[in-house]
Image (spheres, grey):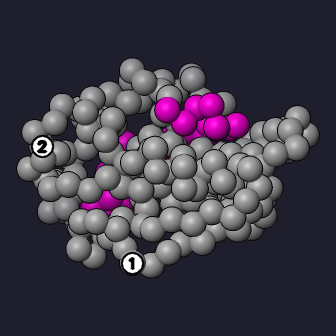
Amino acid sequence: MSLKDLEPILAAVTRARDRSDRPVLVALDGRSGVGKSTVANRLVPLLDARLVAGDDFYAGGTDEEWAARSAIKRLEHAFDWRRLRAEALEPLLAGQRASWRSFNWLSWEGLSDEVIVCEAGPVIVLDVVYSGRPELSDLVDIAVLLTLDDRERRARLVSREGAPYMARWQALWESAEDHYFSSVRKPDSFDVIVSSART
């Protein structure tokens, strides 16, 4: 993705900073595989931003537990948004250092022993699907939707994770994303929409 492709986001951040003396929170949202993390890593140096990876706040649980839930319940519990608010977003938006422990992706349960420390900064980039969820909307200054042709998105996921993982992921999470982007956060509700086809 070129700098020109990022200009709508950069311009929105500039406008937000002109209107407020507190840090600006940018929520990068979009379906799995659209390139949110790639875009986030491009934005961080351009904006002198602090990155909060929403995956650190994954709620955990077995495939069987997730499969027993409806799409709506999967969306509600995908990550611990209360802990995300309290430990990361609220301190950073107050201009303070934040610290938290990530979900333990090695054991797939509990939290890692390592403490992540994030210093205050002028811009915070939140990178996670469902970052535009209503429970965080009062904190988010700019909600960005990243889009990508569905065939390319799926191909990226297969290339990144492998076909068996992708099949498992689709069975558990595709319906939750469908519900979210069709009923909770429709595309026209976002402040900025950017195609990530060239990331």
Percent of width and height locating residue 187: 52, 27
| Front in this rendered view, residue 101 or 14 | 101
Q: Is residue 137 magenta?
A: yes
| Front in this rendered view, residue 66 or 144 | 66
Q: Residue 145, labelled with which disc? A: none
Query: Residues under labels 2 and 1: Cα distance?
Result: 28 Å
Residue drawn at the location 38% of the way across and 30% of the way down: 180
Q: Which residues are magenta?
A: 135-160
Q: Can you see residue 199? A: no
Name the image quarter holding the C terminus: bottom right
Lower sequence index among marks 2 and 1: 2
Name the image quarter holding the N terminus: bottom right
Percent of width and height locating residue 163: 19, 62
Quickly name the residue at label 2.
67
Mark 2: secondary structure: helix
Percent of width and height locating residue 183: 39, 21
Tell whether 86 sits left or right of 159: right
Residue drawn at the location 25% of the way across and 44% of the way down: 173
Q: Is residue 14 above or below residue 176?
A: below
- The answer to which image quadrant residue 124 occupies is bottom right
Quickly name the residue at label 1.
113
Residue drawn at the location 25% of the way across and 33% of the way down: 73
Percent of width and height locating residue 78: 33, 45
